[in-house]
Image (cartoon, grey):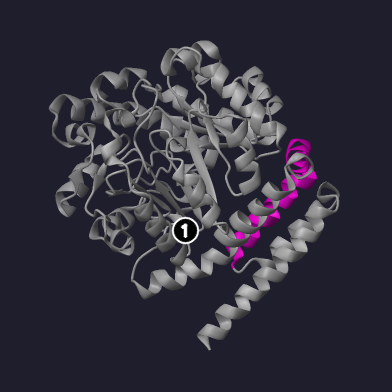
Amino acid sequence: MELNLDNLRRKLKETIIRTGFQIIDKNPEKNVNKLFEIAEKASRDEFTKSKIVSIKKYYNDMPSVKGYIENILKNTNKNCLKKFYSNFIGNAIWYGVAKREKIGIKNDTKIPFVLLISPSMRCNLRCTGCYAANYNKKDDIPYEEVDRLIKEARDAGIYYVIILGGEPFFNEYMLDIYKKYNDMYFTPFTNGTLFNEKLADKLAELGNVMPMLSIEGWQNETDSRRGDGIFNSVIKGMEMLNERGILFGASSATSNSNVDVVTSEKFIDMLIDKGCKMIWYFMFMPVGDDPVKEMDYMLSPNERIELGRKSRKIRTTKEIFTIDFFNDAPYVGGCIAGKYYCHINSKEDVEPCIFSHFATVNVKNKPLMEAFKSSYFKNLRNRQPYNKNLLMPCPMIDNPQNIRDIVKETGAYATHPSAELMIKDKEFMEKLDKLSEEFKPAAEQAFKEDFNNNGNYNMSKG
């Protein structure tokens, strides 16, 4: 009976995808509400259905959202659009939900929505504050291991994988991975320096890859952190992707030196003009070679709060989608580490977060499920939310005593020198405590004013 139900779900999914493809092939921008109706009927839970209804309302009520969606449907390469619809929406968001839940119950754990993996930490740049600077080729994960881990993730219901590093396009075998797992969706975060016509053509052919190009502002901000000429390389990469109708976005590490620039109307309009469909804002974190010194670059309490407000305004007034890794926490129940996503570094340590360099499981020649089932990840989920104020979601910078207690209770080991300092270096610990205390008043006021002291607590445990 269970097998028949799975087959029924699979056939239903295939029917819905085919119907969507027919709309995509014939003036999709004229049939947006039909696509919403299909998605709404296909929703298997009230939460997903309510979100689709909300997006549909935004589309019909907000000119910027309407223009954004129609621009994607009209100007995106049909192959890329179909892969986004079938792989990300159809598999990762819809079909994968029941699959992850079923397998999670069977293994007494939670299966994350997205898997992050760094096949290599090697990079041709040395950006200020980056944790990837200390790795070399011997730490690369072999193709066979990446292949196994991606397969195990898909078998567990994970159809969305973010590729990090290092520079993701250093490993040319990843193109073979993208091709082999053509029912999955991949997002490599790249510095943009390795793009050329051949690579852009390949991505258009694959269709299931949506790159995010790192950019820290204009030429001055980008090149001062990443190196001379990098801004122009990123812009050239964007232009090559846009010419082929490939979906892509941008990623900015927001520090006190560029936060006003990357949220400015002029900068956002430039990204939209280049064809960028989304921008991720990652607050600068002290996880590099000299974390104590790097704290000098972090946002002030008011800058952090204003970043969230500006991000939400851009999201509803401009034809681009913003994701603010910290300030969007109230929408997802706080910190998502260890419950909705996790990271496999190039040594195959499984970390709960790309910024949290601690692990208890290494999956080299071990099943990926062992990491999901670990007492470490369970401890993280049981503690969440770390703070009732969901604008203070992080166990490292907002609630630093939590990371110390978690490491002590679970025996987690540091996977990067900065993590060791975070729980043992007196000066660093004191600065983190002070950072948390100074942010608290601003966070409390903003949580009350902007969120009415409420958030999506139903998602807090995963």
Residue 268, image quadrant:
top right
In depth, the one of 112 and 84 nearer the eye is 84
Instruction: Answer with left or right where residue 168 lies relative to residue 246.
Output: left
Query: What residue is pinned by disc 1?
Result: 458
Magenta-colored segment: predominant secondary structure = helix
Instruction: Answer with left or right where residue 266 lies relative to residue 110.
Output: right
At which x and y percent is residue 17? Answer: 70, 64
Residue found 73% across the figure and 43% down from its top: 77
Residue 311, image quadrant:
top right
What's the amino acid at mark 1?
Answer: Asn
In depth, the one of 450 and 61 nearer the eye is 61
At which x and y percent is residue 291? Answer: 26, 25
Residue found 45% across the figure and 50% down from its top: 333
Quarter occupied by the C terminus: bottom left
Task: Find out whether residue 58 is within the magenta segment.
Answer: yes
Task: Find out whether residue 332 is within the magenta segment.
Answer: no
Furthest residue in direction bottom, as rendered: 1
At which x and y percent is residue 346? Answer: 31, 43
At which x and y percent is residue 143? Answer: 38, 50
User: In this rendering, is residue 290 above or below 413?
Assistant: above
In depth, the one of 200 and 271 nearer the eye is 200
Residue found 47% across the figure and 59% down from its top: 158
Residue found 65% across the figure and 46% down from its top: 205
Mark 1 neighbour class, 10 Å CA radius: few under 14, some 14 to 19, many 20 or more: few
Residue range (magenta): 45-71
User: In this rendering, is residue 169 above or below 368?
Assistant: above
Residue 287 appears in the figure: yes
Residue 278 appears in the figure: no
